């Protein structure tokens, strides 16, 4: 969809680019031609046409809700303007001024909102179909690396004037043209799912024809994402500037090319001057050919489209800038369809505003949370939970005030997003301790498992244990990663009767939690052996109780910090055993009696 105006009215020279000298756009979308020369591209177009008609049908049935963020809301388009120059001072030659760029953005925000002053020139016969497409264009405020930008990307190149090269079938040979590739003397696109890329450069004339600009259609996006965007001749861009071309000095070239970028076709149907083509819009009259670089009087009839004739004042005709003043309702629907869910420009909607995922590590002091906010909408930051927040534009500092989970919420325009951050040490109230037993007897092991529900037990680095009664914890600290769902069982031997309490605590990068609530376990006597005397002096005697007839195979004595102090083994058939403790000093000890694999512990007081 290249757009030309004629420097001289020698149409034959155009044949060098197009086989149709009446057609001033070398890349018009002529479906019949493309169907033969590029079937896969033709299929892409067919698919988008089907998608578009489905979207428009859903508008009519009211089922559109949710397909675009809001069917009637403003769709905001971040824009990067690549200014390709050869080292001129800003405002000179190819290196056009910020003011000139900004004047173009202003034009777009008039034309795509039907706020253009010359809308009053729309003939009454067409005023009823005039539409506010409801797009807003904003120079990008964040570059692809997350740094602040004016959205005006000035690039010095060695190319003063680019040759736009056309393939045999009329499409643009982007590699040969070079504008969109740094390696070819141009500059690479910024991510085209997030930015409308506008390349500004000087374009070499071809004979008497000067290309004003061209765009890539959205149905080419999937195959050619890196060349998505529009190219505009830098003397046909904006409405403020020293070198603007007569008749193309109102910024409407860019309005026209962005129309293509949003899936609009030329209003005359790209059929040269025939009456068989279509722009796929019912509310634009069938039109013979382009109204080329002029402004006809109303009505201008072709294709028996009287009495009102051509909508030559439509942005998608080829009339001069001052003549153009309207997009229609049908064009609005087509343009907005590409942003619907599943459409080729859906990513723009999805990229409007979101919080980036915060760190998963617990916040011991403070952390920074950032927002993906390509339009730099003003952001309001709030937080709930054990932390405070201080927002500064697209980022905010979260500062710990306690322990637990904080929820960060950011609001920008009509968009809100929330993320949670873990703050401080683990909450003891979230530690759970499981045991299959609520009671045991002295000397029998009981398995316990600790965890930190729900679903985030892997934040446990290790657990500490304690019991309020003396107990022997068999396993050491465990790592959460050993068994994320259940932790690792700890066997605890209770050594005195009564009610024992088991607690755990859990450590993360910020430190240990408090001790968890205690789990009670009833410890009964249930001893199989009697130790006498107790307190003992030089010798302790172990005798079987009740009906037990098991052999005593080993007896050990531990001090009260768990050190083994005595050990004695016994032969088969031993029913009563003695152990000499005459060299142990007065104190509280534990005596462990084994019968094969079965062990029993009792407290033993020694008085020497
Ligand atoms: Ca039409
Ligand atoms: Ca036509
Ligand atoms: Zn065009």
Image (tube, rainbow, N blue to C red):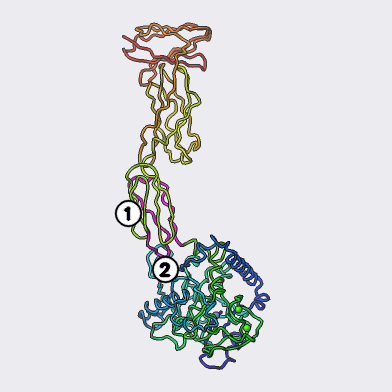
**Helix, strand or loop: magenta stretch:** loop
Whether the residue under disc 2 has CB within 8 Å of ligand 3: no
Relative to 371, residue 47 above or below: below
Bounds of the magenta segment:
352-379
Dot 2 surroundings within 10 Å: few (below 14), some, or many (20 or more)?
many
Nearest to N terminus: mark 1 or mark 2 = 2
Q: Along the line of sight, which residue is nearer the eye, 361 or 319?
A: 319
Give the residue number, with chain letter if any, for mark 2: 140
Question: x, y (%) of residue 528?
Answer: 48, 11
Q: In the structure shown, which secondary structural element does the residue marked by tag 2 occupy?
A: loop
| The label number, if any, that marks residue 390 in the structure image | 1
Question: x, y (%) of residue 222?
Answer: 57, 66
- Is residue 553 shown left or right of residue 386? right
- Is residue 316 shown left or right of residue 400? right
> Residue visible at 54% across and 71% down?
335
Relative to 603, residue 446 above or below: below
Within the image, what quadrant is residue 577 found in? top left
Q: Along the line of sight, which residue is nearer the eye, 500 or 233?
A: 500
Question: x, y (%) of residue 601?
Answer: 43, 16
Dot 1 surroundings within 10 Å: few (below 14), some, or many (20 or more)?
some
Within the image, what quadrant is residue 291 found in? bottom right
Q: Distance between the residues labelled 1 and 2?
A: 24 Å
């Amino acid at each position: 969809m290249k757009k030309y105006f004629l420097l001289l009215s020698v149409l034959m020279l155009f044949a060098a680019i197009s086989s149709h000298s009446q057609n001033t756009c070398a890349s018009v979308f002529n479906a019949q031609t493309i169907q033969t020369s590029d079937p896969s591209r033709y299929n892409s177009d067919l698919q988008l046409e089907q998608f578009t008609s489905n979207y428009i049908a859903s508008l009519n049935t009211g089922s559109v809700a949710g397909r675009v963020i809001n069917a009637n809301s403003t769709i905001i388009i971040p824009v990067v303007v690549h200014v390709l120059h050869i080292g001129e001072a800003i405002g000179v030659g190819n290196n056009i001024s910020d003011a000139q760029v900004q004047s173009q953005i202003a034009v777009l925000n008039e034309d795509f909102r039907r706020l253009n002053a010359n809308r009053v020139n729309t003939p009454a016969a067409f005023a009823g179909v005039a539409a506010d497409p409801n797009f807003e264009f904003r120079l990008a405020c964040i570059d692809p690396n997350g740094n602040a930008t004016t959205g005006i990307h000035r690039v010095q190149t060695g190319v003063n004037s680019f040759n736009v090269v056309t393939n045999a079938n009329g499409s643009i040979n982007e590699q040969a043209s070079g504008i969109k590739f740094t390696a070819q003397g141009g500059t690479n696109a910024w991510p085209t799912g997030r930015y409308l890329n506008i390349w500004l450069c000087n374009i070499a004339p071809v004979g008497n024809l000067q290309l004003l600009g061209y765009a890539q259609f959205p149905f080419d996006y999937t195959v050619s994402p890196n060349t998505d965007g529009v190219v505009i001749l830098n003397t046909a861009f904006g409405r403020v500037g020293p070198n603007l071309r007569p008749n193309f000095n109102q910024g409407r070239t860019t309005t026209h090319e962005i129309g293509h970028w949003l899936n609009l076709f030329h209003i005359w149907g790209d059929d040269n001057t025939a009456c068989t083509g279509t722009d796929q819009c019912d509310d634009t009259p069938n039109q013979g050919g382009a109204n080329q670089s002029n402004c006809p009087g109303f009505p201008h009839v072709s294709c028996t489209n009287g009495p009102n004739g051509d909508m030559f004042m439509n942005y998608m005709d080829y009339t001069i800038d001052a003549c153009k003043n309207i997009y229609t309702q049908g064009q609005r629907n087509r343009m907005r369809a590409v942003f619907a869910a599943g459409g080729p420009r859906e990513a723009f909607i999805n990229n409007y505003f979101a919080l980036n995922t915060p760190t998963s590590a617990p916040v011991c002091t403070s952390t920074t949370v950032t927002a993906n906010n390509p339009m730099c909408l003003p952001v309001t930051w709030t937080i709930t939970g054990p932390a405070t927040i201080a927002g500064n534009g697209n980022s905010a500092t979260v500062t710990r005030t306690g322990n637990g989970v904080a929820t960060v919420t950011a609001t920008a325009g009509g968009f809100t997003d929330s993320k949670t951050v873990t703050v401080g040490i683990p909450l003891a109230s979230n530690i759970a301790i499981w045991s299959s037993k609520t009671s045991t007897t002295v000397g029998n092991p009981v398995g316990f498992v600790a965890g930190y529900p729900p679903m985030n037990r892997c934040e446990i680095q290790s657990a500490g244990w304690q019991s309020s009664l003396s107990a022997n914890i068999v396993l050491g600290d465990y790592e959460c990663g050993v068994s994320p769902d259940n932790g690792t069982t700890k066997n605890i031997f209770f050594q005195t009767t009564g009610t024992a309490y088991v607690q755990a605590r859990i450590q993360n990068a910020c430190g240990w939690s408090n001790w968890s609530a205690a789990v009670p376990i009833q410890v009964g006597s249930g001893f199989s052996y009697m130790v006498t005397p107790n307190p003992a002096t030089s010798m302790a005697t172990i005798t079987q109780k009740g009906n037990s007839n098991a052999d005593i195979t080993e007896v050990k004595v531990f001090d009260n910090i768990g050190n083994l102090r005595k050990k004695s083994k016994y032969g088969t058939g031993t029913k009563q055993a003695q152990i000499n403790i005459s060299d142990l000093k007065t104190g509280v000890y534990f005596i462990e009696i084994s019968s094969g694999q079965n062990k029993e512990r009792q407290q033993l007081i020694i008085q020497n």
